[in-house]
Image: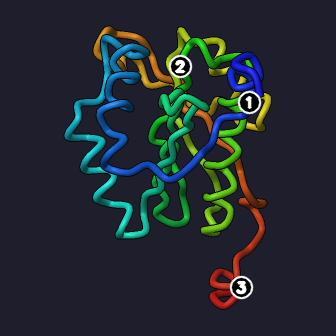
Amino acid sequence: MSAADDEHAAPAVRAMTDADVAAVLALERRLFPHDAWPESFFREELAEVASGTRQYWVAVAADGAVIGYAGLMCVLPLADVQTLAVAPEAQGRGLGTRLLRLLVDAAAARRADQVLLEVRSDNPGAQALYAREGFAAIHTRPRYYPDGADALIMQKPLRDLDAPTSASRLRS
């Protein structure tokens, strides 16, 4: 396989570990200079993986570089995308879609009713990705981000939210 083939090979996606935090943090700071999570947030989130409420993944290029990451919190009946990021040099090749689908599939496997996320109102690329994957804007949080940008709350139902659940049928 040539170096050009390696460059275009699909990145490996695996569970994030503590050993990945430094690389994830460097990418986080590069992508989100004004509102990057501190190292302690990533470490706290990874500590919650054992509780079963969090799942985090990294996408790793053939050369071992972390080029993306994603995290999900699931406290039934809701799942929430905690973070999703792809390095600029890896964008436009489907990695964001792949990571988002991984998050949605994990939420569905845990039997969440819906997946929620926040996205900057000034990030049309991310909004378009989420819309293509079935998310719809349901609310705006004014001045949510430290620089004053609004957050759009987007939702993807994983099942019919109007259908009665077995618990509600028992109450009727």
Label 3, label 1: how far apart the Cα atoms are: 50 Å
Q: Earlier in the sequence, mark 3 or mark 1?
A: 1
The reply, left or right, for residue 28 in relation to residue 88 is left
Q: Amino acid at mark 1?
A: Ala
Label 2, label 1: how far apart the Cα atoms are: 15 Å
The reply, left or right, for residue 13 in relation to residue 150 is right
Residue count near mark 3 (Cα–Cα under 10 Å), binned few <14, some 14–19, many ≥20: few
Kindly indicate whether the residue at mark 1 contacts the one at mark 2 (C-beta within 8 angstroms).
no
Q: Residue furthest bottom?
A: 170
Viewport quadrant of the N terminus: top right
Q: Which residue is depicted at the point 74% across and 16% down?
A: 4
Nearest the eye: 11 or 32: 11
Q: Earlier in the sequence, mark 2 or mark 1?
A: 1
Residue count near mark 2 (Cα–Cα under 10 Å), binned few <14, some 14–19, many ≥20: some
**Colour scheme in the image?**
rainbow
From the top left corner, tell me how far across and down residue 170 is, in percent: 67, 91
Residue that numbered label 3 is attached to: 169
Above or below, 154 against 44 in this view is: above
Nearest the eye: 3 or 43: 3
Residue 112 lies in quadrant: bottom right
Residue that numbered label 1 is attached to: 9
Nearest the eye: 148 or 64: 64
Q: Which label belongs to residue 39?
A: none
Q: Amino acid at mark 2?
A: Ala
Label 3, label 2: how far apart the Cα atoms are: 47 Å
From the top left corner, tell me how far across and down residue 81 is, in percent: 52, 43
Q: Which label belongs to residue 87?
A: 2
Element carrying mark 3 = helix
Above or below, 18 against 110 in this view is: above
Element carrying mark 2 = loop
Viewer-nearest of discs 2 and 1: 1
